[in-house]
């Protein structure tokens, strides 16, 4: 006996939602690039790419601005406009700051402490530094591979540096910042 689909989503939609949850920007790019389906579906793919935590989604949208399909192009351009508005709100602190000064972004990072990588490495000047980097799950494998290579890497290509300091270990100022801002004990 076949199980009843109680979620209301067909198999394709459920798989796509799983990819979204995993942050698989390539699957979203591919779906948007196909240009098939209703405009609302294309808008959903584009807006999801705009909402990706790291810059990969934005880069994909920027590369698709001149897509041959008018519907895809419209979805991409609307998503880029929305992303610009979100970035302005984030920079101005509008609608993301509560009365106690806690921001949505700070709460978001604090809830993802398991995604913070603590690194001791030499910076581009050759000085030892400590970095605390929020790595998006979809970039983690690439990040770990890059760490195992002998090449220099730009941490911002894989996530967001939430704190850093020079030295052999995290200094008190950095420890206090991480504790106050994100609730992390280092």
Image (cartoon, helix red, strand yellow):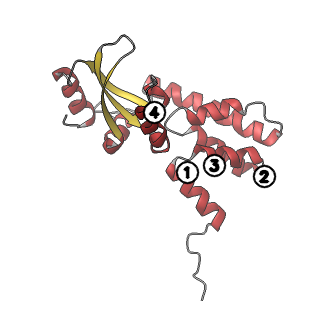
Which residue matches tag 2? 36
Q: Is residue 154 left or right of residue 50?
A: left
Real-space Cα separation, disc 2 to disc 1, in angstroms: 18 Å
> Which residue lies at the image location 21% right of the left edge and 21% below the top edge?
168
Q: Earlier in the sequence, mark 3 or mark 2?
A: 3
Q: Earlier in the sequence, mark 1 or mark 3?
A: 1
Comparing 114 with 104, the one in front is 114
Which residue matches tag 4? 146
Specify few, some or many for label 2: CA neighbours under 10 Å numbering under 14, 14-19, or 20 or more.
few
Which residue matches tag 1? 20
Real-space Cα separation, disc 1 to disc 3, in angstroms: 8 Å
Q: Is residue 16 left or right of residue 181?
A: right
Q: Earlier in the sequence, mark 4 or mark 1?
A: 1
> Which residue lies at the image location 38% right of the left edge and 27% below the top edge?
161
Instruction: Name the element at disc 2.
Output: loop
Residue 124: percent from the left, percent from the top? 40, 14
Query: How many discs mark residues in the rendered view?
Result: 4
Q: Are marks 4 and 1 in contact (CB under 8 Å)?
A: no
Residue that lies at the very extreme toward the left in this rendered image: 172
Question: Closer to the camera: disc 3 or disc 2?
Answer: 3
> Which residue lies at the image location 65% right of the left edge and 42% below the top edge?
46
Q: Earlier in the sequence, mark 2 or mark 1?
A: 1
Real-space Cα separation, disc 4 to disc 3, in angstroms: 22 Å
Which residue matches tag 3? 27
Instruction: Name the element at disc 1.
Output: helix
């Amino acid at each position: 006996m076949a199980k009843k689909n109680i979620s209301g989503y067909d198999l394709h939609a459920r798989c796509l939602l799983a990819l979204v949850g995993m942050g698989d920007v390539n699957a979203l790019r591919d779906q948007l690039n196909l240009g098939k389906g209703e405009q609302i579906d294309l808008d959903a793919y584009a807006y999801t790419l705009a909402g990706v935590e790291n810059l990969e989604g934005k880069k994909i949208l920027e590369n698709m601005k001149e897509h041959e399909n008018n519907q895809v192009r419209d979805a991409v351009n609307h998503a880029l406009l929305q992303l610009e508005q979100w970035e302005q709100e984030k920079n101005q602190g509008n609608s993301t700051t509560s009365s106690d000064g806690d921001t949505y972004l700070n709460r978001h990072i604090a809830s993802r402490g398991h995604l913070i990588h603590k690194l001791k490495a030499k910076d581009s000047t050759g000085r030892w530094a400590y970095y605390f980097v929020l790595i998006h799950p979809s970039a983690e494998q690439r990040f770990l591979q890059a760490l195992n290579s002998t090449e220099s890497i730009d941490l911002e290509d894989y996530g967001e540096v939430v704190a850093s300091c020079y030295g052999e270990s995290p200094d008190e100022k950095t420890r206090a910042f991480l504790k106050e801002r994100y609730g992390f004990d280092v």
